[in-house]
Amino acid sequence: MEIASGIGRITAGDLGMLCAAAAISLPGCLLVLFFTALLSSFGSGLTLQINYLSVGVTAYILYVLGCYIAQTLDNSQIPESRRPKNRILRKFPFSLPCVLIIASVFGLTCGSQIYQIFGIEGQPLFSISTVNVMAVAFFLIFWLGDDYRLRKVIPAFSIALLYCVCVGEMELFSQTPLKIFLPLLMFLMAVWGLVKDLRQHHMRLNTSIFPALREAAMAFLFMVLLALPALFVYEGTGTYLFRGVLSSILSFGGGDAYLAVAGGMFVTSGLVLYSDFYSNLVPVANAIPGSILCKILTGTGYFLGYRADGSIWTGILTGLGGFGCAVAMSCITYSVGAYFYEQLENAAVFEHLKKATRPIISGLLFTVSLGLLYNCIQIGAKASISTWFPPVLCLICLGGELMFVKRFRYRPLYMVLGSAAAALLFCNLAAYIMAV
């Protein structure tokens, strides 16, 4: 949608930007509302069959997420002439910082999923949210910049680690002043580091920001107008829109990356059910055309409204509020982002931010993949079959898709249909065997 916003602004100014973003995302929004409303009205028997189909669709989604991660690693490959002289490290083709970032983000966010998959009781030490991951990333990038001396690195990583412990699910320091002091300290240090970097590179804002703010105000008004009906029928609309705005701001790295952000914002926080998000919404959003940001926000809005009072119309109105949020935030992101990028694109700190974005998102996508597999386990539990059968079948379908791409070529429609058909057949067969 950001590309459509830019083309619209160039072609027809402020209004053109808003209309272009709305036009390109409206078909996806309407299709999501149609299919999610259809799923909500089905009986339990048909819903179970759709859950079986989603096991196969999940395999395709895992393939797409895996391709994103593989591309991240591929982009980080080091030419053989520049690799370390150490014999062991020389055989490792990928950038060590890239791999460490992916592993660190995954380690900080995967706790809940691992505990759920293996049925471990208690709370993981970390398992921090997407927002907190981004907060730590911005803090380290802005504070360190190009300066990797130990006297800066050790305090920064110590503060970041302590912050992760504070905001983790165990909440070890939730009742202490550290809960407030650490975020404030990180914010001040990040701002200081950013200002210092801009001064060193003689960066300054040479043009007025008011045109960008005017465009942002128009987009915000569009969101408010579409969200007004939802405010009267669903009391949680304000919280939902706030999280939608925040998730849009944090959705670096393209459409696939937004699944990681949305999963943290809406599913991990408990606003949206695992089954609604991973079994119903994600398969539908990946099967129809349009912006993934718009489709996911529209779908989460629908399920929040529908689950509040059981009314499809409440879900549709809340979903339209999500559509307005997606369109507005895409326009605002493009307008404000384009302004700062034009002014500060050569700043070193933004170069580091661009390099770190894909590894961070890749680590989050590993966690999303675990969430998808856990949803398959839940499908097995609801269907009274072995809880491990759907996730194992999903991984087998994923292996089949990899062999298909290697033998033929990438054909998403054939891959989705083949995996979904196989999952439907074998899940029903397993249910029949268990019933006999």
Image: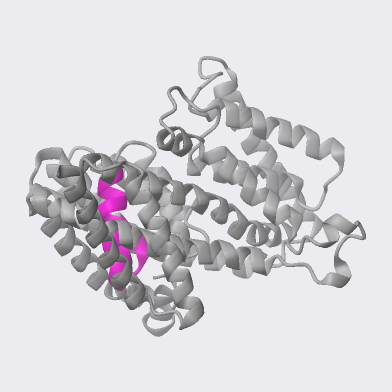
Residue at 33% x, 36% y is 270
Front residue (pair 145, 374): 374
Span colored in magenta: 272-296
Position of the N terminus, as image quadrant, is bottom left
Figure check: 276 above or below 426: above
User: Would residue 156 appear left or right of 319 to someone viewing this image?
Assistant: right
* Nearest to the observer: residue 242 or residue 132: 132
Q: Nearer the viewer, residue 343 or 68?
A: 68
Residue 65 in view (yes/no) = yes
Residue 317 visible in image: no
**284 magenta-colored:** yes
**Quarter of the figure with residue 231:** top left
Q: Quadrant of residue 190?
A: top right
Q: Residue at x 53, y 68 (%)?
A: 338
* Residue 255 highlighted magenta (yes or no): no
- Where does the image place residue 204, in percent across and percent down from the top left? 69, 61
The x and y percentages for residue 435 are 15, 43
| The C terminus, quarter of image | top left
Q: Is residue 75 above or below residue 16?
A: above
Q: Position of residue 17 (x, y in %)?
A: 37, 74
